[in-house]
Image (cartoon, helix red, strand yellow):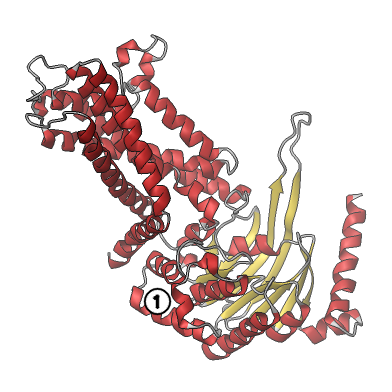
Amino acid sequence: MERTLRQTWAFMFRGYHLTRRYISWVIVFNFYALTGSAAVALIGVAANDHQLTLTLVSGALLWNFLSVLYNEIAMSVAYERWEGTLEYTFMAPVSRLVHLAGLSLFALCNSVVNTAIVLLGLMAFTDLTVSGANVAGVVVVIGASTLAFVGLGVMAAALPVLSPERGAEGTHIFQGSLLLVSGVYYPVEVLPAWIRPISMLSPATYTLSACRKLIGVGDPATTPQRLAGAPLSAVRSELLVLVAMGVVLVPLGLWIFGRVERWAKHTGRLKRTG
Amino acid sequence: MLPAIEVHDLKKRFRKRRSLRTANASAEWALAGVSFTVAPGETYGLLGPNGSGKSTLIRILSTLLIADGGEVRLLGHRLPDEQARVRRLIGRVSVDAAFYKKLSARENLLYTALLYGLAPGTAEQRAMAVLERLGMEERTFSAPLEEMSRGMQQKISIARALMLDPPVLLLDEPTTGLDPKSRRDVQTFLEDLRQRQGTTILLTTHDMAEAERLCARMGFLAHGRLVAEGTADGLRRRALADTLDDAFIKLAGEMVSSGDKQKG
């Protein structure tokens, strides 16, 4: 048990020190996330539409959280290829489950901090209030969706193992597709009919839908001074779908990663230069 | 006594990317039936030109590649079936000192120690002892790797492998590109290590003098085949050569020529 904890901590330790050493880039990325989110939120302010502002702010915050979480896990193999350390990590006596759990834990901490920074920044640009919102319910929904996004991230992390040249690009294409179909800044109903069914496969769709209900977006009782957040029972169906997705996607992600790793060991794709 | 490393009829080939115009993918044998054993505590050298299959063999032993045929055992554990056990028994130093270059030597070593489930304090003490024996100053421990010379990085790489105290050490051209002083430091250290701790070492190198100094036995690898094996004296006698360089050219060169003929 002590050994497993140390191995899990290894990835937190590495992530923390790399963040420290690349702090100028971390500041740049956080700044960009903040300005991007503020720019989107101000569309609602300009329209003088409180409900629209809430829709955009909740979309920006949740997408920021989920995309940082996904990206940190999905790009972990690509980062190691660039650093040249991939072979050393893969030959260490650490199970892939512990390896990916350690990565996911650091990714989670990173996305919480990143989202907190964006939230604080948005409060300077809008008259945000959380009064009346079901904040505890939002935390429960995000917790459930975290598992599903970890599973997606692990699956996407296999892409740079599969293709040293094109894998990293593939993770971003996948992330962009999620942004498009999940209703981050608009209801999924506005999507063309042929693409709408795909939105049902994205965990972000259910996360956003549930969190918006819990915040009170779309509820006529919501006012700029007080939100009319729904109780957790109102998002039971979304919560169930998210839990089911997590239960399926995490083991599926590990299985896919394992198969791809074995294939890479047969073909020599783990080699640093590819 | 059970060999520390057993390699029997090991085969590995890599497929070349399929061309749009050709129907069949071509495959090239990196290892075409290599067999040898290394006794516990022995230092065994694998010598061969670039592309002879040395690094492929080290990668298979390091659990980073899966062979296409043959059998490999490390301390009795078969690969790839028992790769989790084997990973606890090996340390590897590759020609490219693979580190997080922005992190300090200390941070890199502590990360590895944690990854292997070691207590950070114990690992740090071991790493410091190795670095001291390799002639490095303590202050370099906290400098980022990117600010270090290649020789210093390679010494840190050796410290990383040795702080894990592995019974089997896989060294893939560990002194390539090092200045003469650093090369001598590393060689002296490896001699000392074998004498003191009885570590089994598999060393690949281009440097005949290094092989002769460090290895009790060695094998000449060419075109994925082990063309000759024995002690340095034995190989020189067999090739009727004065130097190991000449013996290598004679024994491995003959094989390269005949291999080319067969291909043609």
Left or right position of A274 against A38: right
**Total number of numbered labels?**
1
The front one of B198 and A47 is A47
Pointer 1 indicates a residue of which chain?
B
Residue located beneath label 1 in the image: B123
Q: Residue A67 at x, y = what percent?
A: 36, 36
Q: Quadrant of residue A125?
A: top left
Q: Residue A213 at x, y = what percent?
A: 16, 23
Left or right position of A42 against B66: left
Q: Quadrant of the N terminus of chain B?
A: bottom right
Which amino acid lies under the numbered mark 1 shown in the image of this protein? Ala
Please name the residue shown 53% across and 90% down the image: B196
Q: Quadrant of residue A62?
A: top left
Work out whether A238 lies above or below A264: above
Residue ranking furthest to the top? A193
Please name the residue shown 57% across and 41% down the image: A163
Q: Residue B123 at x, y = what percent?
A: 40, 76
Residue B179 in view in this figure: yes
Residue B163 in view in this figure: no
The front one of B158 and B261 is B158
Q: Residue B242 at x, y = what percent?
A: 90, 85
Work out whether B216 lies above or below B259: below
Helix, strand or loop for disc 1? helix
Work out whether B184 lies above or below B249: below
Please name the residue shown 26% across and 42% down the image: A117
Work out whether A9 lies above or below A127: below
Left or right position of A47 against B115: left
Please name the residue shown 20% across and 23% down the image: A54
